[in-house]
Image (tube, rainbow, N blue to C red):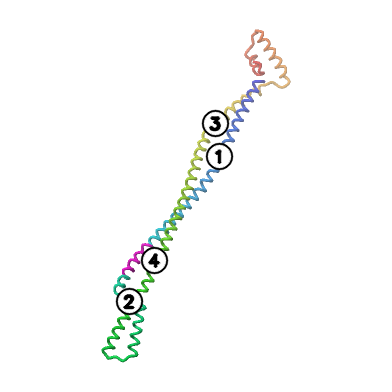
């Protein structure tokens, strides 16, 4: 009977080990699932940040392209203004006052034909200067507008650049977290791969001991003959100790009852 108990204890010990390893396997699988969820989330966040970085790059490029156009327009406008300044004889306000005085003189005073022609000629010249001055004023106003647009575009481009840097850092952070989780998953899957054959090994050993136990239990006599068989085994043991010869069957019976 002791041999049967040993078989049972060994089987139960191995089954307990199998259960322990299966618990560890389930823990590893759950941890892998958790990490896979993190990988999925971090990948989505990384890809979203990358899309935003791409969009911000495009906007920044568009801003600089517009800056280039405005700078070119400003250069052309400055050349025109320089030309106007070289040909201008006075300010718009002074020219208007001068024309007003000449018109008053022409209308209120009597002049010779020669003097009138001179006045008309001078007034025509001043009106041309005034027209130039008005055009110059419009150009200056355009210049101010372009300079303001240029400042706004530089500010906009800088904002896009700052956002781009921040989102690029976010993308890198999500990528690093994702890669860290993937490395952890790889390690856990390696542990899982090692665990599976170990579980099989202990399960096979437990099955072996269970079959041996079941076989020997099946070979035991009925309960009513068990006591008589035990008594016989004890007699065989006494004979064996006294030096008498015993058969292999008798030794097997001693072994079953844990007496040898």
Contact? badges 3 and 1 (CB < 8 Å) = no
Residue furthest to the top in view is 243
Residue 38, percent across and down? 53, 46
In the image: residue 250, left or right of residue 51: right
Residue 29, percent across and down? 55, 39
10 Å crowding of disc 2: few (<14), some (14-19), many (20+): few
- Specify the label residue 90 is tagged with: 2
Given this view, does label 2 or label 1 mark the residue nearer the observer? 2
Q: Earlier in the sequence, mark 4 or mark 3?
A: 4
42 vs 131: above or below: above
Residue 18, percent across and down? 59, 31
99 vs 76: above or below: below
10 Å crowding of disc 1: few (<14), some (14-19), many (20+): some
- Specify the label residue 198 is tagged with: 3
Q: Earlier in the sequence, mark 2 or mark 1?
A: 1
* Residue identifier under label 4: 147
- Specify the label residue 29 is tagged with: 1
Q: Earlier in the sequence, mark 3 or mark 2?
A: 2
105 vs 251: above or below: below
Given this view, does label 4 or label 3 mark the residue nearer the observer? 4
């Amino acid at each position: 009977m002791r041999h049967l108990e040993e078989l049972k204890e060994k089987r139960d010990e191995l089954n307990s080990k199998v259960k322990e390893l299966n618990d560890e396997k389930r823990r590893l699988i759950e941890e892998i699932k958790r990490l896979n969820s993190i990988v999925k989330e971090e990948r989505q966040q990384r890809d979203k940040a990358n899309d935003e970085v791409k969009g911000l790059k495009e906007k920044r490029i568009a801003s600089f392209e517009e800056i280039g156009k405005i700078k070119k327009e400003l250069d052309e406008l400055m050349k025109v203004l320089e030309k106007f300044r070289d040909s201008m004889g006075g300010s718009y306000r002074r020219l208007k006052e001068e024309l007003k005085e000449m018109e008053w003189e022409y209308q209120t005073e009597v002049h010779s034909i020669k003097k009138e022609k001179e006045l008309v000629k001078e007034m025509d010249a001043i009106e041309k200067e005034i027209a130039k001055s008005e055009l110059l004023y419009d150009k200056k106003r355009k210049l101010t507008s372009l300079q303001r647009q240029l400042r706004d575009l530089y500010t906009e481009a800088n904002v896009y650049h700052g956002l781009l840097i921040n989102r690029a850092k976010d993308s890198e952070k999500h990528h690093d977290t994702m890669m860290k989780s993937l490395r952890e998953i790889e390690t856990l899957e390696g542990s899982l791969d090692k665990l599976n054959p170990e579980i099989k090994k202990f399960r096979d050993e437990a099955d072996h001991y269970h079959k041996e136990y079941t076989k020997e239990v099946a070979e035991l006599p009925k309960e009513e003959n068990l006591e008589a068989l035990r008594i016989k085994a004890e007699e065989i043991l006494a004979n064996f100790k006294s030096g008498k010869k015993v058969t292999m069957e008798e030794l097997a019976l001693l072994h079953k009852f844990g007496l040898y």
